[in-house]
């Protein structure tokens, strides 16, 4: 049955307008994005089959074009729309960090870093450069590696921090395997960077390790 033939209060768009987006299931939210299904399958049915096929939203959102378009009813247009929505979300999160104090925006900072690094297929090392109000000056990805590691050069981090006239920085890198456990190398580079940056009167506030929809703070672990 077409969604248009459902009772008004059960139609995803009407439900969102009357109750708010939080009241909708993942399948219903995805159905609003999909807009239409195909003969014999409503948009909600298609959304449910997608979630069953990919397992969760993370896997769906990180799917390649080929994997995404193998599902009947989905093509390049839907894929590009989805990627545009995801990028808008990342830019929205980044914009909120430029307007507020990151020390008071822990959840937003974590969500932003997960959105940027959580689905990357190789290790990426990034920095958040902050001003003296702890507002974001610049997010920059500095080093790129393999599935297991990326070579990190403290001199380049210090050089970038000075170039942005940063008063503080937050560093982050992802583990494509999904684990957020800090390695001995992660701990050592954190301590080394803290020492080098302190000589330049720049604070190292935290080192986040990002997995798949997970994040680990080395500051909270007492490393900093």
Image (cartoon, rainbow, N blue to C red):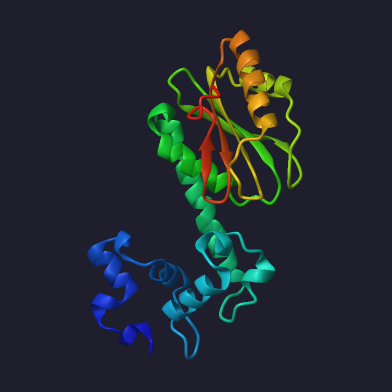
The x and y percentages for residue 150 are 74, 37
Instruction: In this rendered view, identify the residue nearer to me: 52 or 36.
Output: 52
The x and y percentages for residue 100 are 39, 30
Instruction: In this rendered view, identify the residue nearer to me: 7 or 58.
Output: 58
Q: Is residue 140 left or right of 16 when viewed as pictured?
A: right
Q: Residue at x 48, y 81 (%)?
A: 37
Q: Residue at x 61, y 35 (%)?
A: 182
The relative height of residue 87 versus residue 41 in the rendered view (above or below) is: above
**Residue 15 in sight here:** yes
Instruction: In this rendered view, identify the residue nearer to me: 83 or 55.
Output: 55
Q: Quadrant of the N terminus?
A: bottom left
Q: Residue at x 51, y 62 (%)?
A: 57
The x and y percentages for residue 51 are 51, 71
- Location of residue 204 (image quadrant): top right
The x and y percentages for residue 220 are 48, 29
The relative height of residue 163 versus residue 40 in the rendered view (above or below) is: above
Instruction: In this rendered view, identify the residue nearer to me: 70 or 171.
Output: 171
- Location of residue 188 (image quadrant): top right
Q: Residue at x 55, y 24 (%)?
A: 223
The relative height of residue 190 versus residue 66 in the rendered view (above or below) is: above
Q: Quadrant of the C terminus?
A: top right
**Residue 163 in sight here:** no
The relative height of residue 216 versus residue 134 in the rendered view (above or below) is: below
């Amino acid at each position: 049955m077409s969604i248009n033939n459902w009772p008004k209060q059960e139609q995803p768009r009407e439900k969102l307008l009357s109750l708010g987006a939080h009241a909708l299931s993942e399948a219903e939210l995805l159905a609003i994005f999909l807009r239409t299904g195909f003969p014999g399958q409503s948009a909600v049915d298609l959304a449910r089959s997608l979630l069953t096929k990919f397992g969760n939203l993370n896997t769906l959102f990180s799917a390649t074009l080929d994997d995404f378009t193998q599902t009947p009813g989905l093509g390049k247009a839907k894929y590009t729309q989805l990627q545009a929505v995801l990028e808008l979300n990342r830019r929205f999160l980044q914009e909120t960090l430029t307007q507020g104090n990151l020390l008071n925006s822990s959840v937003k900072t974590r969500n932003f870093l997960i959105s940027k690094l959580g689905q990357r297929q190789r290790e990426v090392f990034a920095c958040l450069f902050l001003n003296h109000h702890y507002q974001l000056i610049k997010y920059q990805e500095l080093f790129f590696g393999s599935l297991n590691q990326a070579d990190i050069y403290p001199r380049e981090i210090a050089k970038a921090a000075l170039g942005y006239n940063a008063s503080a920085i937050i560093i982050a890198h992802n583990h494509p395997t999904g684990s957020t456990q800090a390695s001995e190398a992660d701990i050592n580079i954190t301590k080394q960077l803290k020492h080098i940056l302190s000589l330049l009167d720049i604070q190292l506030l935290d080192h986040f390790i990002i997995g798949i929809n997970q994040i680990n703070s080395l500051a909270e672990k007492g490393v900093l």
